[in-house]
């Protein structure tokens, strides 16, 4: 990946699925109607352990807004390793960017 051209690297980042999609509706083996990549089972489990499936309506609204703002500003999705994070860590990181 490091030796790939910049456009290939950017495409890899752009194809990364958004954090905090409706986890219960994601099929990890297929693509959704918008042809965007879905998350793997491992990612689904990590996001679940981080509490992203239990966001309150206000937290989800903030997350969605901040995530859209981030994508608009940087033209890539917000990416964060959530393996050892809580939903508060994720929300704080996204809000700060």
Image (cartoon, rainbow, N blue to C red):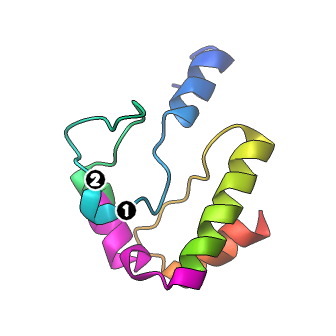
Q: Do the residues labelled 1 and 2 touch (CB within 8 Å)?
A: yes
Label annotation for residue 22:
1
The percent coordinates of residue 64 (x first, y second) are 60, 63
The percent coordinates of residue 42 (x first, y second) are 26, 57
Which stretch appears magenta? 44-58
> What residue lies at 57% left-to-right and 18% top-to-bottom?
8
Report the front residue among 62 and 13.
62
> What residue lies at 26% left-to-right and 64% top-to-bottom?
24
Is 53 part of what is drawn in magenta?
A: yes
Q: Can residue 2 be seen in this view?
A: no
Residue labelled with disc 2: 26
> What residue lies at 63% left-to-right and 14% top-to-bottom?
5
The percent coordinates of residue 55 (x first, y second) are 47, 81
Q: Can residue 39 be seen in this view?
A: yes
> What residue lies at 43% left-to-right and 74% top-to-bottom?
52
- Crowding around mark 1 (Cα neighbors within 10 Å: few <14, some 14 to 19, many 20+) is few
Q: In this view, does 64 lie above or below 29?
A: below
Q: From the image, which quarter does the C terminus lie in?
A: bottom right
Direction from residue 88 to residue 94 in the image, left or right: right
Q: Is mark 2 on a helix, strand or loop?
A: loop
The count of marks equals 2
| Secondary structure predominantly adopted by residues drawn in magenta | helix
Q: Is residue 40 above or below residue 97?
A: above
Label annotation for residue 72:
none
Direction from residue 40 to residue 6 in the image, left or right: right
Q: What element carries label 1?
A: loop
Direction from residue 62 to residue 32 in the image, left or right: left
Direction from residue 79 to residue 21 in the image, left or right: left
The percent coordinates of residue 36 (x first, y second) are 42, 35
Is 35 part of what is drawn in magenta?
A: no
Distance between the Cα atoms at labels 1 and 2? 7 Å
- Crowding around mark 2 (Cα neighbors within 10 Å: few <14, some 14 to 19, many 20+) is some
């Amino acid at each position: 990946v490091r030796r790939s051209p910049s456009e290939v690297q950017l495409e890899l980042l752009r194809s990364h699925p958004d954090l905090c999609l409706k986890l219960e509706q994601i099929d990890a083996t297929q693509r959704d109607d918008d042809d965007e990549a879905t998350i793997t089972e491992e990612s689904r489990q990590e996001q679940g352990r981080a509490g992203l499936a239990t966001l309150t309506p206000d937290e989800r609204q903030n997350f969605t807004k901040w995530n859209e703002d981030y994508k608009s500003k940087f033209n890539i999705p917000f990416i964060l390793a959530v393996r050892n994070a809580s939903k508060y860590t994720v929300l704080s990181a996204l809000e700060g960017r």
